[in-house]
């Protein structure tokens, strides 16, 4: 695939696009030795702060630094304003949808989407039916993966409603860029991202459970230091000034959740959990799990503690549900979607399945419940044998797959050995929705595929990150 | 403060102190290897190093013979040796990593730097020639971490737990090292005042980094076992003495009582130990039997720790 067919965010023909004017000239003028020196400096800073993620193999857990590229991703104020409008709309719709499907299920009665898509979905938690979630907010923190395919369109690739990660990189990337290139920040008006933790605290505070009468005690629940996003969990706890707890730090007595402290047991009101549903409570989910807090779901259901995001909220980011997001937005908000979806073929539909299996070469096929770039087929770069194998997989269980065209992801340059080189990027803003509140910092995480022509930006598969600037005017 | 946070802080500094102690033991051994004609003392020293760290049996199972380079490797880098410096540094960092939010960025950086600098040696083949620089690295970085804690940490309950880990380890370690060498300290008719005695005693002092300090404390008078026992067990100025560690533990448990407003079993126990030591004399200790005295001390300290664990770390909940 040729780069010329992709949207280049920096260049328009031979002209530099306006948001990138200053930065492009700056990058072009940077001497080679300075680039190298700054790259080493950046790496040392990341190491020093301890920003690492864990990589697993069969034998060991090792710590890696996520590769950081110094060429910033830049969005104009107008571009950002559209993204913000679209994300706000989506997070309202997602929470309305979750409230509905766990209560009266109007959307099914109206036959907007097929019943089996909900009731046969493993992400649908039947035990949540009829439970009133505090303020009807199931998913207060949503990471929306957005791709840009041309000058005017930003499209949503995926909504992440469970425990989206990466927000600490957004903040640390900025810290490091500010330390290394203060001159850029003096000459450009770049919106700050450092208020994210206080926004998050504000949003969580608005979601206190019914039985909490005082200023709520808020904690972050982490699976522990071996989790790949552990750095982020501790970073957020630190910035928010709250405790970072593991399952063993909590216990439930008479439906009240406590944490163990050096001064005895202390009541907990709100848990921002960064563990998956099935590790929340061994009495409810996996009795074989050592993670989790026995009795915490009862504490939740009796209004003694709030768990954010709510158990069962993950169904909203299911890839099959995603395909209905335009209809979902229209149904609950009576509005047209601001941000479009990517054209998606649903394999559970016979006609669409036929199209998919005959056009695998030009499609990306994803498992409905997969994540992180695993278990997918990129038709253009797969061998005949791989395609055949995948075809059989799809035919044997069509419900498990969706297909999308191979996206022409936009490109932004990275500093590579031969100076600037175009690479594909995506964008993940982190939005926050609470009780009558919506917050979105003007910034996001930009993930970049470091390999030439690669479309996979996931850090687990060799992707890197960039600082993302939203210009204030 | 979260119980686990307190526990992680405690073990962060306890493992650091252990890494430091082992480095200091190795320094003595290295020194001996530079002195000619001390074949006997040399072997003794290596054996007592293994005995002090309580790993003689483990070592002999994997290596069969007492050999300088192998012991060095075993103490510095062996993954199977629970208390190797490598494991101590990794465990210290694992603990502090769990409580990143409870220490200053500078303290975290200091621990992290020790880890990364030490990893450079972990990742290459060990050569005995590098022993001095490795020891130097450990000592310097551990001192840096401790200094950073003193200079940057808020003096809250977290600081108390950090400090407690340090002194529980030191009390235990010093008691063990004296115990392993107590036979050197006891008067024996054939050796008293001989060259051998002086040499052994100076090694003993060096292994707890107190040779120079001893000279300052007791001037140039003749070294004798009474003074050494007094110095390492009862002296209130010697930072390696048992009394010093007990006094520190007592101080920090008293602070915790004030912060939390609650009397605890651990404080009662350490108070008793403190008073007993304060009124003890070397003669009394020798009458009781040095070995018995030390065994009891180790048991008492461990009992204080168990009370700390139960009360503050809530491990039984």
Image (cartoon, coloured by chain):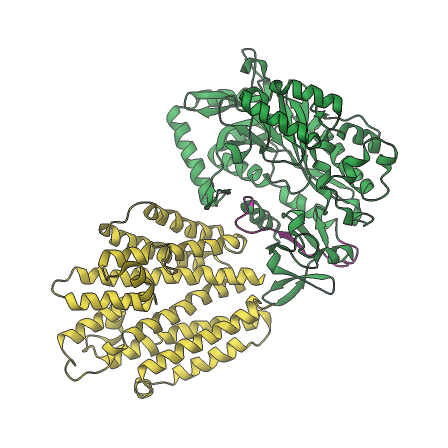
Chain colours: A green, B yellow
Q: Is residue A416 visible?
A: yes
Residue A157: x %, y % from top left: 66, 28
Q: Nearer the viewer, residue A438 or A408?
A: A408
Residue A331: x %, y % from top left: 84, 31
Tally of numbered tags? 0
- What quarter of the picture does the C terminus of chain A occupy? top right
Residue A47: x %, y % from top left: 45, 42
Instruction: Please determine whether, in this image, residue A389 is positioned above or below residue B246.
Output: above
B40 vs A146, left or right, is left
B159 vs A276, left or right, is left
> Per the image, is A219 magenta?
yes
> Per the image, is B43 magenta?
no
Magenta stretch, main secondary structure, is: loop
Instruction: Please determine whether, in this image, residue A288 is positioned above or below residue B306.
Output: above
Q: Residue at x 43, y 24 (%)?
A: A30
Q: Residue at x 33, y 77 (%)?
A: B233
Instruction: Please determine whether, in this image, residue A335 is positioned above or below residue B226.
Output: above
B280 vs B303, left or right, is left
Give residue B221's quadrant in the image: bottom left
Magenta residues?
A209-229
Instruction: Please determine whether, in this image, residue B160 is positioned above or below residue A277.
Output: below
- What quarter of the picture does the N terminus of chain A occupy? top right
A408 vs A45, left or right, is right
Q: Residue at x 42, y 75 (%)?
A: B247
């Amino acid at each position: 695939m040729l780069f010329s067919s992709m949207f280049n965010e920096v260049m328009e023909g031979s002209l530099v696009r306006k948001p990138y004017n200053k930065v492009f000239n700056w990058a072009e003028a940077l001497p080679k030795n300075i680039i190298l020196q700054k790259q080493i400096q950046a790496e040392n800073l990341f190491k020093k702060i301890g920003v690492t993620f864990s990589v697993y193999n069969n034998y060991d857990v090792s710590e890696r630094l996520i590769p950081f590229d110094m060429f910033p991703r830049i969005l104009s104020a107008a571009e950002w304003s559209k993204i913000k409008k679209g994300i706000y709309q989506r997070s309202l719709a997602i929470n309305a949808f979750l409230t509905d499907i766990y209560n009266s299920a109007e959307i099914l009665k109206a036959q907007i989407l097929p019943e089996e898509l909900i009731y046969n979905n493993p992400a649908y938690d039947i035990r949540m039916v009829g439970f009133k979630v505090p303020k009807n907010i199931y998913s207060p923190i949503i990471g929306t993966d957005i791709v840009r395919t041309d000058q005017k369109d930003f499209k949503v690739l995926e909504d992440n409603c469970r425990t989206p990660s990466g927000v600490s990189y957004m903040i640390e990337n900025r810290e490091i860029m500010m330390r290394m290139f203060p001159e850029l920040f003096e000459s450009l008006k770049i919106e700050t991202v450092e208020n994210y933790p206080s926004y998050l605290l504000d949003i969580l505070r608005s979601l206190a459970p019914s039985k909490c009468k005082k200023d709520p005690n808020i904690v972050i629940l982490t699976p522990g230091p071996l989790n790949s996003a552990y750095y982020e969990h501790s970073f957020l706890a630190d910035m928010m000034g709250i405790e970072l707890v593991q399952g063993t730090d909590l216990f439930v007595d008479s439906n009240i959740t406590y944490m163990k402290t050096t001064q005895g047991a202390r009541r907990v009101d709100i848990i921002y959990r960064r563990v998956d549903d099935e590790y929340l409570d061994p009495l409810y989910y996996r009795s074989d799990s050592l993670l989790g807090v026995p009795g915490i779901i009862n504490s939740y259901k009796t209004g003694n503690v709030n768990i954010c995001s709510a158990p069962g909220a993950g169904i909203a980011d299911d890839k099959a549900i995603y395909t209905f997001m335009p209809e979902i937005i229209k149904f609950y908000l009576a509005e047209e979607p601001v941000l479009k979806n990517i054209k998606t073929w649903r394999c559970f539909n016979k006609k669409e399945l036929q199209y998919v299996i005959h056009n695998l070469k030009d499609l990306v096929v994803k498992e409905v419940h997969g994540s992180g770039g695993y278990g997918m087929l990129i038709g253009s770069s797969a061998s005949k044998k791989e395609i055949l194998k995948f075809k059989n997989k799809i035919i044997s269980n069509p419900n498990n797959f969706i297909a999308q065209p191979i996206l022409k992801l936009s490109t932004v340059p990275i500093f590579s050995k031969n100076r600037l080189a175009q690479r594909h990027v995506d964008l993940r803003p982190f939005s926050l929705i609470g009780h009558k509140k919506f917050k979105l910092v003007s910034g996001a995480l930009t993930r970049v595929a470091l390999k030439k022509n690669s479309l996979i930006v996931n850090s687990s598969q060799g992707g890197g990150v960039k600082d993302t600037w939203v210009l204030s005017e | 403060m979260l119980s686990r946070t307190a526990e992680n802080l405690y073990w962060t500094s306890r493992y650091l102190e252990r890494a430091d102690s082992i480095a200091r033991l190795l320094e003595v051994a290295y020194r001996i290897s530079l002195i000619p004609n001390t074949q006997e003392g040399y072997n003794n020293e290596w054996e007592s190093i293994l005995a002090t760290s309580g790993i003689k049996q483990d070592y002999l199972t994997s290596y069969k013979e007492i050999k300088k380079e192998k012991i060095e490797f075993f103490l510095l880098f062996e993954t199977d040796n629970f208390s190797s410096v490598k494991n101590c540094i990794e465990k210290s960092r694992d603990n502090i990593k769990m409580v990143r939010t409870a220490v200053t960025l500078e303290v975290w950086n200091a621990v992290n730097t020790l880890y990364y600098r030490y990893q450079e040696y972990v990742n290459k083949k060990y050569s005995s020639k590098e022993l001095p620089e490795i020891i130097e690295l450990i000592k310097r970085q551990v001192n840096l971490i401790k200094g950073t804690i003193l200079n940057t940490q808020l003096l809250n309950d977290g600081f108390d737990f950090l400090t407690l880990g340090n002194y529980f380890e030191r009390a235990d370690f010093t008691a063990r090292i004296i115990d392993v060498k107590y036979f050197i300290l006891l008067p024996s008719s054939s050796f008293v005042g001989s060259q051998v005695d002086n040499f052994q005693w100076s090694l003993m002092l060096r292994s707890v980094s107190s040779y120079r300090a001893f000279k300052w404390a007791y001037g140039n008078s003749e070294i004798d076992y009474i003074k050494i026992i007094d110095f390492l067990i009862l002296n209130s100025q010697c930072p390696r003495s048992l009394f010093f560690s007990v006094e520190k533990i007592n101080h920090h448990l008293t602070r915790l009582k004030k912060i939390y407003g609650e009397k605890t079993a651990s404080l009662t126990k350490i108070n008793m130990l403190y008073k007993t030591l304060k009124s003890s004399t070397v003669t009394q200790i020798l009458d009781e039997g040095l070995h018995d005295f030390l065994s009891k001390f180790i048991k008492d300290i461990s009992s204080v720790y168990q009370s700390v664990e139960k009360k503050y770390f809530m491990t039984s909940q």
